[in-house]
Image (cartoon, rainbow, N blue to C red):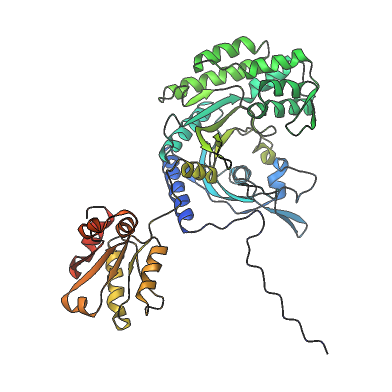
């Protein structure tokens, strides 16, 4: 008779395309989100939290594949309706703005932070769950709202540790791009060709001038030798598109002047340039030059999404890739005006503009520049020398916590004292507190500076080690005061 098979143990592994975040990473992200929220709050935006699940109908045409409701998102059918984990934070805002339009102020200014989920093929640095941090104004048709978003994005980058000179916010207008297509004879009826041209314009950073011209016309060979079909424009049409893409001057005012010259007779293109000129003037009034917020007609974003100004925050410093080659870090935030999104629900035009910051990319940028080390100080650890005196050890951490100092009692097996110090090191604890029977009788404790101790053990000579003892004795009554001094570097 066959024996029953034991049930297979579950595999302890993260699902493909997802990852786990541990203490220091979570602490760094929370710190960054708090800093971003401070700036958004100063600008008058209110927080909003929406459900992680939306109806697929609410997410709508902005999904990657509208013919298959479960493509691009994590979706399931329930009682005849398709539900999905939210794909971004903008579609939920559009639903909220429509659902609560009689209760919300106009304009409605909100920010939202949280994870979003995309059912896409994962890759290096590309996950199916990631954090976004958005700020949007709904109900303001004036481009002053777009200019404010750009200024706020600049302040936000500087608040989290990206100084001026290390970033630029590039601004364009979809009306200018649409007008450029109109000037080469592509009408609104040429939907597929217009979309193909815009997608090609967006590849400027990857393939350069010649690559763009080839892709706009007959096609090109890519790096692997494969032939990529072109859009099929004439050489003259492609050159006209290139003229618009390559217009930037040395200053915003020069760029605006040149754009008026190249946008032709298109009413829409001229309207787009006019709006860019207003944005440039408004951000200049807030202290921004083209060095931080730059008019750049090569920016192409959200082909089926944005209806007016578009902007992208790009970090300009170099980092080393996995092969040790220098490269620019690239984009960490983007946004623009999307006046048709709420209209899907209400049937009435509702102007809206906003920005989304890629939190994980911004954190990676700060780590690459050494402005975050992926580590955070652990708690002060009170060691256990005598199990019978646990109440006194708990009293110590209670005093430290009341003083705002992070602290814990070692709760493992205290038999091996060396293991307690190893635990404190693994926790990145700055200080260990030691009190045995003898110290208790004399009303003192030993405090061990673990950070200094590690430095001494690594580099110091015997003489230096003796002159800078990492462990010293202090009065028990002075525990809080002395540890605060150690944490603030005064000892």
| Residue 459 on image: x %, y % | 32, 54
- At horizontal 59% and vertical 12% (from top left) the residue drawn is 260
| Residue 167 on image: x %, y % | 48, 31
Left or right of 216: which side holds 431? left
Residue 418 position (above or below residue 88): below
The quarter of the rendered structure image containing the N terminus is bottom right
Residue 300 position (above or below residue 157): above
Residue 291 in view, yes or no: yes
- At horizontal 59% and vertical 56% (from top left) the residue drawn is 19
Left or right of 486: which side holds 181? right
Residue 190 position (above or below residue 80): above
Residue 402 falls in image quadrant:
bottom left
| Residue 403 on image: x %, y % | 27, 61
Residue 175 falls in image quadrant:
top right
Left or right of 219: which side holds 491? left
Left or right of 250: which side holds 73? right
- At horizontal 46% and vertical 27% (from top left) the residue drawn is 292
Q: Which residue lies furthest to the bottom in this view?
A: 1
């Amino acid at each position: 008779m066959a024996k029953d098979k034991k049930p297979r143990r579950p595999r302890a592994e993260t699902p493909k395309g997802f990852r786990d975040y541990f203490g220091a990473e979570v602490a760094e992200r929370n710190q960054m989100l708090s800093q971003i929220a401070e700036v958004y709050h100063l600008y008058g935006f209110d927080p909003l939290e929406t459900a992680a699940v939306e109806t697929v109908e609410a997410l709508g045409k902005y999904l990657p594949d509208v013919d298959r409701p479960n493509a691009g998102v994590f979706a399931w059918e329930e009682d005849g309706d398709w539900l999905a984990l939210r794909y971004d934070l903008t579609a939920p805002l559009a639903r909220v703005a429509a659902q609560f339009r009689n209760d919300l102020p106009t304009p409605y200014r909100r920010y939202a932070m949280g994870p979003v989920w995309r059912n896409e093929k994962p890759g290096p640095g590309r996950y199916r769950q990631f954090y976004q941090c958005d700020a949007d104004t709904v109900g303001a048709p004036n481009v002053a709202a777009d200019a404010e978003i750009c200024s706020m994005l600049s302040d936000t980058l500087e608040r989290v540790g990206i100084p001026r000179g290390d970033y630029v916010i590039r601004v364009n207008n979809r009306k200018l791009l649409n007008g450029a297509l109109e000037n080469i004879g592509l009408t609104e009826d040429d939907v597929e060709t217009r979309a193909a041209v815009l997608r090609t314009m967006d590849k400027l950073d990857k393939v350069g001038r010649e690559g763009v011209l080839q892709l706009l016309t007959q096609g090109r060979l890519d790096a692997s030798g494969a032939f990529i079909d072109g859009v099929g424009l004439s050489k003259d049409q492609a050159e006209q598109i290139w003229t618009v893409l390559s217009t930037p001057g040395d200053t915003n005012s020069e760029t605006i002047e040149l754009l008026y010259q190249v946008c032709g007779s298109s009413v829409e293109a001229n309207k787009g340039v006019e709006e860019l000129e207003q944005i440039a003037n408004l951000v200049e009034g807030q202290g921004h030059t083209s060095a931080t917020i730059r008019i750049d007609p090569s920016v192409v974003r959200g082909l089926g999404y944005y209806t007016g100004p578009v902007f992208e925050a790009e970090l300009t410093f170099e980092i080393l890739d996995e092969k040790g080659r220098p490269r620019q870090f690239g984009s960490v935030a983007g946004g623009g005006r999307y006046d048709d999104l709420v209209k899907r629900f209400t049937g009435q035009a509702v102007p809206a503009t906003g920005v989304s910051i890629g939190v994980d990319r911004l954190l990676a940028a700060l780590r690459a520049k050494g402005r975050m080390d992926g580590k955070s100080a652990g708690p002060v650890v009170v060691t256990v020398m005598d199990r019978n005196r646990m109440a006194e050890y708990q009293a110590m951490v209670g005093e430290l916590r009341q003083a705002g100092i992070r602290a814990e009692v070692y709760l493992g097996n205290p038999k091996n004292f060396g293991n307690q110090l190893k635990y404190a090191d693994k926790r990145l604890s700055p200080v260990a507190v030691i009190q045995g029977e003898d110290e208790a009788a004399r009303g003192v404790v030993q405090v061990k500076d673990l950070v200094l101790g590690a430095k001494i053990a690594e580099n110091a000579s015997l003489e230096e080690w003796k002159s800078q003892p990492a462990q010293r004795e202090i009065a028990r009554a002075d525990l809080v005061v002395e540890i605060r001094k150690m944490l603030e570097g005064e000892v």
